[in-house]
Image (cartoon, rainbow, N blue to C red):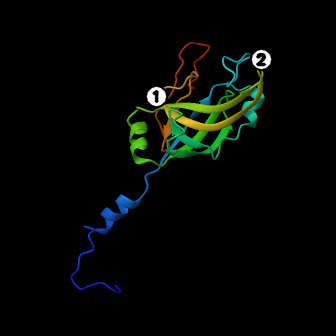
C-alpha cells in the first residue's frame, strides 16, 4: 500500500464488514398498483382501461404513504397490464429501513400517486402518474405487493365455483 504506515490499522475490522456496511440493500417487489378499470370511476384519479394500457410507470419514484417531501425509498422498474386488466408493477426498495418494514409486513399495500388537473366544474383535464407509494393498505381494493425477491407473499384464493382460480 502506498503511503501506509507499517503496522497501522485502517479502522475497519475486516473487509467483509466494510462491504456489508457500504453495500446498499435492494428489495425487488412485484404487485398490483391499480385494479381492473370499472365502468364508472369511484374517484377522479381512477384509471380507465385506455389510460391503464397507456400507463408507463417505469422510472417513477417510490415513496412511503405519499410523503413526497421526503426522499424516495426506491423506484419503479417496469409496469404492464395483467391478465385481468389490472396495472402490475415491479419496483425496488433501496432504503434499508423501508425494506425491513416491507419484509415484516408493515408496508405491503401499493398506492398510485396520480396528479389530476380539473376544471372549475370538476371535469378532469389531465391525469398523470407522479409516484408509487408503499403503504399499510391502498385505497383501491386489491392493491398489494404480491412478490418479494421472487417469493410469493400475497395471494387471493377464491374457492367458489365461479372464482375457483387463484388471483
Residue at 47% in and 32% down = 108
In the displayed structure, does residue 94 sit left or right of residue 4? right
The residue drawn where x is 62% and y is 14% is 162
Task: State which quarter of the image contains the N terminus.
Answer: bottom left
x then y, percent, for residue 62: 55, 41
Which mark is in front, 2 or 1? 2
Q: Name the residue under label 1.
A: 136
The residue shown at (60%, 32%) is: 112
Tag 2 residue: 121
Q: In which quarter of the image is residue 140?
A: top right
The residue lying toward the viewer, choosing from 33 and 2, is 2
Q: In this view, does 45 lie above or below 93?
A: above
Can you tell which quarter of the image residue 66 is in? top right
The residue sitting at the left extreme is 7
What secondary structure is marked by label 1? loop
Q: Report x, y in % for residue 113.
A: 61, 33
Give the percent coordinates (x, y) of residue 7.
21, 82
Report, in whole angstroms, how far the alpha carbon at label 2 lies from the one at label 1.
Answer: 33 Å
Q: Is residue 118 left or right of residue 135?
A: right
Amino acid at each position: 500500500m502506498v503511503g501506509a504506515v507499517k503496522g497501522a490499522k485502517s479502522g475497519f475490522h475486516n473487509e467483509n464488514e466494510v462491504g456489508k456496511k457500504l453495500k446498499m440493500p435492494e428489495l425487488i417487489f412485484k404487485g398490483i398498483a391499480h385494479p381492473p378499470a370499472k365502468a364508472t370511476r369511484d374517484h377522479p384519479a381512477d384509471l380507465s382501461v385506455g389510460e391503464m394500457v397507456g400507463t408507463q410507470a417505469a422510472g417513477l419514484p417510490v415513496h412511503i404513504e405519499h410523503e413526497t417531501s421526503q426522499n424516495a425509498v426506491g423506484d419503479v422498474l417496469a409496469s404492464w397490464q395483467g391478465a385481468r386488466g389490472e396495472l402490475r408493477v415491479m419496483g425496488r426498495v433501496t432504503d434499508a429501513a423501508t425494506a425491513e418494514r416491507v419484509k415484516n409486513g408493515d408496508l405491503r399495500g401499493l398506492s398510485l400517486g396520480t396528479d389530476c388537473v380539473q376544471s372549475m366544474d370538476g371535469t378532469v383535464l389531465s391525469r398523470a402518474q407522479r409516484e408509487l407509494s408503499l403503504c399499510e393498505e391502498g385505497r383501491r381494493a386489491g392493491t398489494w405487493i404480491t412478490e418479494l425477491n421472487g417469493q410469493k407473499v400475497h395471494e387471493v384464493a377464491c374457492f367458489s365455483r365461479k372464482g375457483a382460480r387463484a388471483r
